[in-house]
Image (cartoon, helix red, strand yellow):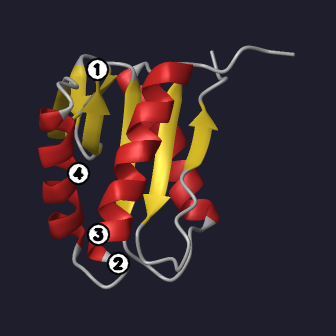
Amino acid sequence: MPEILHKELSYKVNGILFQVHNKLGRFCKHDQYCEAFESLLRENNIDFKREIEIPIKFNEIKLTGNKLDFLIENKIVLDVKCKKEITTKDYVQMKRYLIASDKELGIVVNFSENSLKPKRILRKIK
């Protein structure tokens, strides 16, 4: 059985996501969820960067357009959503973020769902 990537950190992050969802419910705004999540990351002494631009290079030109909601301990990319459902477009967006940031693990979380179901996405493309 393959080992789970960043198992302990993923477990902590998911726990914090559930704390936010349990406290705020499913009708808040994107920034409100992000602010609550950020405050709990700080409380738990988890290193992170928020809303960072990750450019990709094309012939020595930096192309912008990849803005990560969170990069957690320089290991996990977290994308926060507040919408009816997660779509294929959201998975493709996370793959793009993982490739641009050279990270292996992403989590997409949709706070508008009745029951929170964070989705782990692996890069796997070399």
Q: Mark 3 points at which residue?
A: 23
* Residue identified by numbered label 4: 37
Dot 3 falls on a residue whose secondary structure is helix
Q: Do the residues labelled 4 and 1 touch (CB within 8 Å)?
A: no
Q: Which residue lies under the disc numbered 1?
A: 73
Is the Cβ of the residue at disc 1 closer than 8 Å to that at disc 2?
no
Q: Which residue is drawn at 37% across and 68% down?
A: 22
- The mark closer to the camera, 3 or 1, is 3
Residue type at mark 1?
Answer: Glu
Mark nearer the viewer, 4 or 3: 3
Name the foreground residue: 59 vs 115.
115
Where's residue 110, x and y in %?
46, 66
Q: How far apart are marks 3 and 2 (CA)?
A: 6 Å
Q: What whole-number distance in Å separates the C-alpha atoms at marks 1 and 2? A: 26 Å
Instruction: First in sequence, mark 4 or 1: give its number.
Output: 4
Check if mark 3's residue and mark 2's residue have beta carbons within 8 Å. yes
Against 77, residue 65 (above or below) is: below
Counting other residues with Cα less than 10 Å from the Cα at mark 3, is it few (<14), some (14-19), or many (20 or more)? few
Amino acid type for the residue under numbered disc 2: Gly
Marks 4/1: CA distance?
Answer: 14 Å
Q: Mark 2 points at which residue?
A: 25
**Vertical arrangement, residue 24 with respect to residue 35, above or below:** below
Mark 1 or mark 2: whose residue is earlier in sequence: 2
Q: Does dot 2 land on a helix, a strand or a loop?
A: loop
Cα–Cα span, label 3 and label 1: 24 Å
Mark 4 or mark 3, earlier in chain:
3
Of residues 52 and 55, the one drawn nearer to the viewer in this rendering: 52
**Position in image of residue 12 (x %, y %):** 41, 33
Amino acid type of the residue that numbered disc 3 sits on in the rendered structure: Lys
Q: Is mark 1 on a helix, strand or loop?
A: loop
